[in-house]
Image: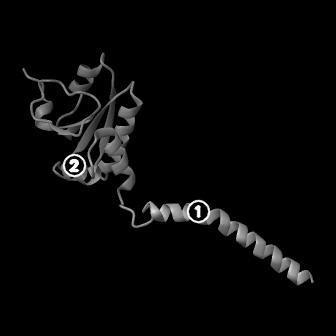
């Protein structure tokens, strides 16, 4: 008798488990949420939300590949904006294994901070939700919130 009660209890618990877990699994299958995962799924979603660029991780990696590996990249973010800082962290993640320097600027320190960039050891500057100065002629806009500026354009006009 004890064996049958034990087996019956486990049967009931298993039935409750199935009754609770089957509906969410069926919904996920019907919504096509089960399947292979893109290796850049998270960063693509973040870049899509912040810059409105689809497959942004792959496209951004190609942009970074155009820079010399031995030089670092400066990422300029707005010190007072959390989305700018977050976008800067995503850019730093995608720039790996290159060395990156994050520069948090405010409107008061923007010009001084840009002037302090050592151009012999830097290959590019990436502006995250910060507008590059108008005198920077050669820049590549990556979506709505990222501007990629090669080192040649970082030199201010005389």
Structural distance between the alpha carbons of marks 2 and 1: 44 Å
Q: Are marks 2 and 1 in contact (CB under 8 Å)?
A: no
| Residue that protrudes farthest toward the left in the picture | 158
Q: Position of residue 122 (x, y in %)?
A: 21, 40
Q: Position of residue 19 (x, y in %)?
A: 67, 66
Q: Which residue is mark 1?
A: 23
Q: Position of residue 80 (x, y in %)?
A: 39, 24
Please tell me in which quadrant of the rendered image residue 41 appears. bottom left
Relative side of 34 to 130, left or right = right
Q: Position of residue 103 (x, y in %)?
A: 32, 31
Q: How is the image coloured?
A: one colour
Please tell me in which quadrant of the rendered image residue 15 appears. bottom right
Question: Which residue shows up at 29% across the image and 37% down it?
Answer: 75
Work out whether 118 lies above or below 33.
Answer: above
**Where, quadrant-wise, is the C terminus in this rendering?**
top left
Q: Check residue 64 in the rendering and tell me which mark sits there, or answer none.
A: 2
Query: What element does badge 1 sit on?
Result: helix
Relative depth, front residue between 86 and 22? 22
Residue 18, visible in the rendered structure: yes
Say which of marks 2 and 1 sits in front.
1
The 10 Å Cα crowd at callout 2, few under 14, some 14 to 19, many 20 or more, is: many
Relative side of 58 to 13, left or right = left
Label 2 or label 1, whichever comes before in sequence order: 1
Residue 150, visible in the rendered structure: no
**Where, quadrant-wise, is the N terminus in this rendering?**
bottom right
Work out whether 109 lies above or below 5.
Answer: above
């Amino acid at each position: 008798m004890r064996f049958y009660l034990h087996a019956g209890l486990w049967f009931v618990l298993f039935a409750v488990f199935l009754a609770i877990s089957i509906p969410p699994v069926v919904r996920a299958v019907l919504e096509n949420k089960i399947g292979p995962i893109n290796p850049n799924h998270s960063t693509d979603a973040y870049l899509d939300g912040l810059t409105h660029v689809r497959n942004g991780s792959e496209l951004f990696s190609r942009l970074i590949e155009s820079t010399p590996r031995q030089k670092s990249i400066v990422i300029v973010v707005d010190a007072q904006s959390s989305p700018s800082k977050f976008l800067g962290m995503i850019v730093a993640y995608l720039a790996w294994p290159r060395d990156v320097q994050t520069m948090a600027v405010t409107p008061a320190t923007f010009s001084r901070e840009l002037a302090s960039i050592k151009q012999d050891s830097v290959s590019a500057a990436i502006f995250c939700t910060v507008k590059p100065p108008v005198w920077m002629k050669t820049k590549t806009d990556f979506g709505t919130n990222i501007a990629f500026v090669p080192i040649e354009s970082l030199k201010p006009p005389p």
